[in-house]
Image (spheres, rainbow, N blue to C red):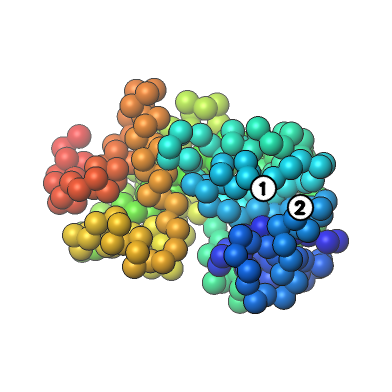
Amino acid sequence: MPIGVIGAGKWGTALAFALSEKNDVYIASRTPRELKNFISIEEILKLEYLVITIPAQQISGWLKEHFMFNGQKVLVASKGIEAATGKFLNEIYDEYIPEENICFLSGPSFAAEVMHSLPTALVINSKNEELSAEFASFFPSFIKTYMSTDVMGAEISGAYKNVIAIAAGICEGLKLGKNAAASLIARGLVEMQRFGRNYGTKDESFIGLSGAGDLFLTASSTMSRNFRVGLGLADGKSKETIVKELGEVAEGIGTAYALHMIAEEKKIYLPIATEVYKILEGKDPKESLKDLLTQ
């Protein structure tokens, strides 16, 4: 099956590699790359099946500039909430692609491990279960796929866990210990689930692969960009310096700002996400710790 992957960063390249086990895979990005089967955006949009890995903070502009719907079936493999508007990815894509033509990928998935064909399990989320099954059939033998119709639950899990991962990185950077890290991650999971209930999500989305699975991965390893953001913040670095040093997108930063905006508007209690936002804005991480312990 010809499949087009849009976005040639680490995750896009890893997915192209994985999907090529069973399919003819083409890849495109805004800038030319020396990659096998690299084609133009115009050419790739003619394919029936597309996997889009463009970061959350860039997708609105990209869709507006480049995308035209011609019946394509799309798997969104990005995670995050748009910082400027507080929009979830499904809300952004809804302006361009019918609900029955789109799926969202979630679950624990470091690109580096996928590139080495190491096993993992992921969830394909869509209101169209037949389309989920189609995309599931494209995945390689080392990735086990599950299906869910709880798109918003998967979206919130995938976005929120990056913010908790920043907090976990701060915890590690301050050398607060494993007890503190476990407590933080557990309470982060509760916070994610509580936030999700405001959007009618299913609790099982948060205790499965999309939620707990992805959170435990991202909040416990220096392979996680967002965890490394937390380490930098604990070291007293500004978010601008950290992003420059990373040289990559860390979705948790934009998502922290989006969550703060939503929490203010909807009066939702998000203690960990709120403190991450304040630290990104310059608050001393040690003061945040003191405030979290006394709330």
Residue 47 found in image quarter: bottom right
User: At 20% across and 48% down in the image, what residue appears?
Assistant: 282
Q: Which amino acid type is marked by label 1?
A: His
Q: Which amino acid type is marked by label 2?
A: Leu
SS category of the residue bearing label 1:
helix
SS category of the residue bearing label 2:
loop
Q: Residues within 10 Å of mark 2 (few under 14, many from 20)?
A: many
Name the residue furthest right: 1
Percent of width and height locating residue 226: 39, 58
Q: Residues within 10 Å of mark 1 (few under 14, many from 20)?
A: few
Percent of width and height locating residue 98: 74, 34
N-terminal of the pair, mark 1 or mark 2, is 2
Quarter of the rendering occupied by the N terminus = bottom right
Discs 1, 2 touching: Cβ within 8 Å: yes
Q: Horizontally, is 6 left or right of 183 in the view?
A: right
Quarter of the rendering occupied by the C terminus = top left
Give the residue at mark 2.
45
User: At 33% across and 27% down in the image, what residue appears?
Assistant: 264
Q: Horizontally, is 29 left or right of 171 in the view?
A: right
